[in-house]
Amino acid sequence: MNPSALYQSAQARVVAAATRSGRSSDAVHILVVSKTVAAERLVELLDVGVTAFGENRVQELEEKRAALRELRPHSEVRWELIGPLQSNKVRRAVAAADRISSVDRISVLEAIARIAREEGSERHVAIQVNVDGDAAKAGFSAAELRAAIPAIGAVVQGGGVIIDGLFTIGRLTPTPEDSRATFASLRNAAVEVRRTAAEAGLSIGPLLSMGMSGDYEVAVEEGATQVRLGSAIFGARA
């Protein structure tokens, strides 16, 4: 099947999962993960209404954004950086990404805000949460994030960033069902974090970015508002 057909199939599965969990059919959005996929292959998805793509690396995001502008100059496309962000690439990320979803430490959030303020803009971000305590993954634990709320609030108060919500990378599991605990943990953590933030006068948006090609239906059932799909749309990467 071609990418557009696979995207439409995935969209139908997302709607079905949302319905099973008593949620609106438009409560969840697909972020198409286009890493290693040539820009020319994305055009077909643009033509069926896809408007959001995610990249793991700043350089690839820059290159693909420029290529799509050439291929479809009148299309409105949003780009998200979903991979780790090194301090020396923050300025480039602020310029290239509409949302930086992998903010895993206060110093990165501060750098994004400072650069955005210098440029007279605001950058949307998501905070990465490591709910499984996986040493191989970046991000705040739920407890660390609650403790960091005053520091995050100070950055937001200074301007330059808008916190859209939370983002996690789940564990590799034998079956999709085995991922359910991770997604439920993020959903529950989000409730506590938002409560703590509200008490401090800080607003954290409703984004819950969790679930990928192997487990996205379970993620939707557990409250995801965004799922990140690559191989489900483009097939296994070489």
Image (cartoon, rainbow, N blue to C red):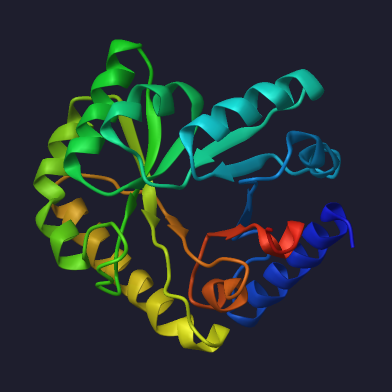
Q: Is residue 39 above or below residue 146?
A: above
How far across and how far down the image is residue 42, in percent? 77, 40
Residue 18 lies in what quarter of the image? Answer: bottom right
Rendered-image quadrant of the N terminus = bottom right
How far across and how far down the image is residue 223, in percent? 49, 70
Image label count: 0
Q: Is residue 102 left or right of residue 222?
A: left
Residue 48 lies in what quarter of the image? Answer: top right
Q: Is residue 183 above or below residue 116?
A: below
Q: Residue at x 43, y 47 (%)?
A: 83
Rendered-image quadrant of the C terminus = bottom right
Q: Residue at x 78, y 58 (%)?
A: 7
How far across and how far down the image is residue 31, in percent? 61, 51
How far across and how far down the image is residue 170, in percent? 43, 70
Q: Is residue 5 left or right of residue 162?
A: right
Q: Residue furthest top?
A: 119
Residue nearest the viewer, comparing 49 with 83: 83
Q: Residue furthest front?
A: 238
Q: Residue at x 28, y 69 (%)?
A: 189
Q: Is residue 132 visible?
A: yes
Q: Is residue 72 visible?
A: no
Q: Is residue 109 left or right of residue 54?
A: left
Q: Residue at x 82, y 60 (%)?
A: 8
